[in-house]
Amino acid sequence: MIIDTDVLIWYMRGNTKAYRVIHRQRHGFSLSVVTYIELVQGMRNKRELNEFKKALRSWKASVLPVNEAISDKAKYYIEQYYLSHSLQLADALVAGTAVIHNLPILTGNDKHYRMIPVIRLQKFSPL
């Protein structure tokens, strides 16, 4: 499973539902390097960054890099869905990562992905 940025943000804000869903992933989970970068850009200091990296290790989370196949998928998704659905670059790359690795995406922002028929979504609700 790929966990999307919003779920990890909810976790860092202390949301109990996000805490439960992440800690239920006993065999680990994945996140796109795009998610990793987005989260690091939102951090205020090195302490937060070090805590995040430590948490990733404890969760057995793998950060999946963007490769040529993923960028090709993202390019296709942008061509298909930017004008009709305003698909953004980060979401296209996360979607491409999910498709190439054949993984579902856990997200509270399912509207960012649901126009892509091959994406398997698992809806997260923080409330």
Image (cartoon, rainbow, N blue to C red):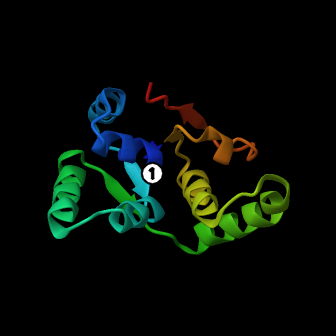
Give the residue furthest to the top: 127
Looking at the image, which residue is at 16% across and 63% down?
Answer: 50
Q: Is residue 113 visible?
A: no
Residue 6, percent across and down?
46, 46
Name the image quarter holding residue 28.
top left
Give the residue furthest to the front: 44
82 displayed left or right of 5: right
Query: How many discs appear?
Result: 1
Looking at the image, which residue is at 52% across and 40% down?
Answer: 107
Mark 1 neighbour class, 10 Å CA radius: few under 14, some 14 to 19, many 20 or more: many
Residue 93, percent across and down?
59, 63
Q: Nearer the viewer, residue 65 or 124?
A: 124
Query: Dividing the image into 4 quarters, which one contains the C terminus?
Result: top left
Query: Dividing the image into 4 quarters, which one contains the N terminus?
Result: top left
Residue at mark 1: 5
19 displayed left or right of 125: left
Name the image quarter holding residue 39.
bottom left
Looking at the image, which residue is at 75% across and 57% down?
Answer: 86
Note whether 2 is above or below 16 in the view shown: below
Residue 97, percent across and down?
55, 58
Q: Nearer the viewer, residue 92 or 50?
A: 50
Q: Nearer the viewer, residue 120 or 81?
A: 81
Give the residue furthest to the right: 84
Note whether 57 is above or below 11 in the view shown: below
Q: Amino acid at mark 1?
A: Thr
Q: Is residue 94 visible?
A: yes
Dot 1: what SS?
A: helix
Looking at the image, which residue is at 44% across and 59% down?
Answer: 35
Residue 100, percent across and down?
58, 57
